[in-house]
Amino acid sequence: MARLTTAMLVAAVMAEANREMVSVVLTHRGDAERGAMFVRLEGRNGQARIEGRHHDPDKGYVWAALHDDAWIESPAADAILEKQISYDQDCWVINVDSPEGLNPFAQHEA
């Protein structure tokens, strides 16, 4: 079975989120075939949550925060993403306006 590329997954989830009136913005475009993905969830009071996707042998793709606290200040979130991009220019970064902390990409993993 053909694997869904990162570009296809990003486009599909962004289109669905936009139909549901969720603000989703692509801020860094990575490798179309298999780039790593990071989602910046914009919460309340200028705080953010950064989630990254990784593969678990038992569960498949899972999303987890890249920091210990549930929400962090915006400058700290910026620093995390800048560091990730400096390590891997082929990664994808998507901003989601999500005061409840819901990652629309986490709902579409197979």
Image (cartoon, rainbow, N blue to C red):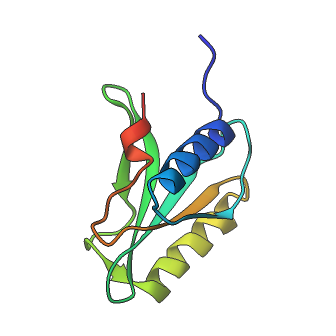
The picture places residue 87, in percent across and down from the top left corner, at: 65, 62
Q: Is residue 101 left or right of residue 110?
A: left
Looking at the image, is 40 positioned above or below residue 105?
Answer: below
Q: Quadrant of the N terminus?
A: top right
Q: Quadrant of residue 100?
A: bottom left
The picture places residue 94, in percent across and down from the top left corner, at: 57, 61
Looking at the image, is 41 positioned above or below residue 20?
Answer: below
The picture places residue 52, in percent across and down from the top left corner, at: 46, 54
Residue toward you, 15 or 59: 15
User: Which residue is painted at 71% across and 52% down in the image?
Assistant: 30
Residue toward you, 96 or 110: 96
User: Which residue is painted at 61% across and 22% down in the image?
Assistant: 3
The picture places residue 35, in percent across and down from the top left corner, at: 66, 45
Residue toward you, 55 or 8: 8
User: Which residue is painted at 72% across and 57% down in the image?
Assistant: 29
Q: Quadrant of the C terminus?
A: top left
User: Which residue is painted at 37% across and 41% down in the image?
Assistant: 107
